[in-house]
Image (spheres, rainbow, N blue to C red):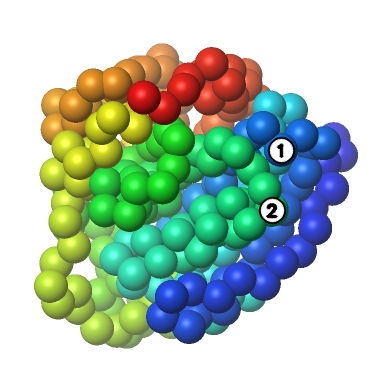
Amino acid sequence: MGFAPAFGAMLRTADGIRIDASHTPNGSLDLGVVVAHGFTGSWRERPTRRIVHVLSGFGGVISFDFRGHGRSGGVSTVGDLEVLDLDAAVKHARSIGYRRVVTVGFSMGAAVAVRHAGLYRGVDAVVAVSGPARWYYRGTRPMRQVHWAIERWSGRLAARLAKRTRISNGTWDPVPLPPHEAAGLIAPTPLLIVHGDADAFFPLEHAHQLYEGAKDPKELWIEPGYGHAEAAATPELIRKIGRWISRTKSQ
């Protein structure tokens, strides 16, 4: 399957980090969708490009690599300073001329999108897919492996070599606002939470905690058989999200 064309862009964050990004236009400036990938992901990888391709049927799409990922500069802070990366992408969408801008985040990108909408605002809707409700979760084997990659020198080296992800060796100080608390700051911007009942990283309790922390307008979709984040997202699920974005207006 071919993908809609993506035009490269280099963004710069408020703290001076270069962000590798792309723009996939669809011929209209009514809606711009900003896609935020998960930890160790990239806009250049096939799962993300497939998602961008489907969403480009609903609006123009900005996708980008978080700091420390792929061709972007800096090091990953695993969801903390990444709000600056997303903010740069949202501002880029506005500079192109998109009248409505909606963020769609997956896994780590979902946590960033929720925090960005709560703390920075400036978007017309938020979609959080497969996101954590709180930090330091180690209740599943995949998340224990993620913490090994983050906290151990050998894990950070493996992430750099295998996934082109450069992870900060520092600790959070202060600890960022947890996503379930940031969710309470998003209203009146609409929030959609999407989670699979087969997610091997974050069980459904995370989706419910995010939803309970948010205020209306909010929606929660529990998707039967859906696993985790970009790799498991079917074109039909992404089209369903695209239709929600198209019909949802900020209040």
Neighbourhood count class around disc 2 (C-alpha, 10 Å): few under 14, some 14–19, many 20 upward: few
- Say which residue appears at 46% left-offset and 22% top-offset: 249
Whether 155 is drawn above or below 101: the answer is below
Horizontal and vertical percent position of residue 70: 60, 71
Instruction: Look at the image and tell me whether residue 23 can be seen.
Output: yes
Whether 155 is drawn above or below 204: the answer is below
Left or right relative to 2: residue 93: left
- Say which residue appears at 61% left-offset and 52% top-offset: 93
Residue marked by disc 2: 96
Left or right relative to 26: residue 146: left
Horizontal and vertical percent position of residue 210: 21, 34
Query: Considering the numbered disc 2 on the image, is that residue within a helix, a strand or a loop?
Result: helix
Left or right relative to 49: residue 244: left
Residue marked by disc 1: 29
Left or right relative to 217: residue 250: right
Neighbourhood count class around disc 1 (C-alpha, 10 Å): few under 14, some 14–19, many 20 upward: some
Q: Where is residue 83, by image quadrant?
A: bottom left
For marks 2 and 1, give the CA distance. 8 Å
Horizontal and vertical percent position of residue 193: 35, 28
Image quadrant holding the C terminus, namely: top left
Q: Are marks 2 and 1 in contact (CB under 8 Å)?
A: yes
Q: Where is residue 212, by image quadrant?
A: top left
Image quadrant holding the N terminus, namely: top right
Whether 26 is drawn above or below 177: the answer is above
- At label 2, the amino acid type is Ile
Instruction: Look at the image and tell me whether residue 3 can be seen.
Output: no
Horizontal and vertical percent position of residue 204: 24, 28
| Front-most of residues 201 and 39 | 39
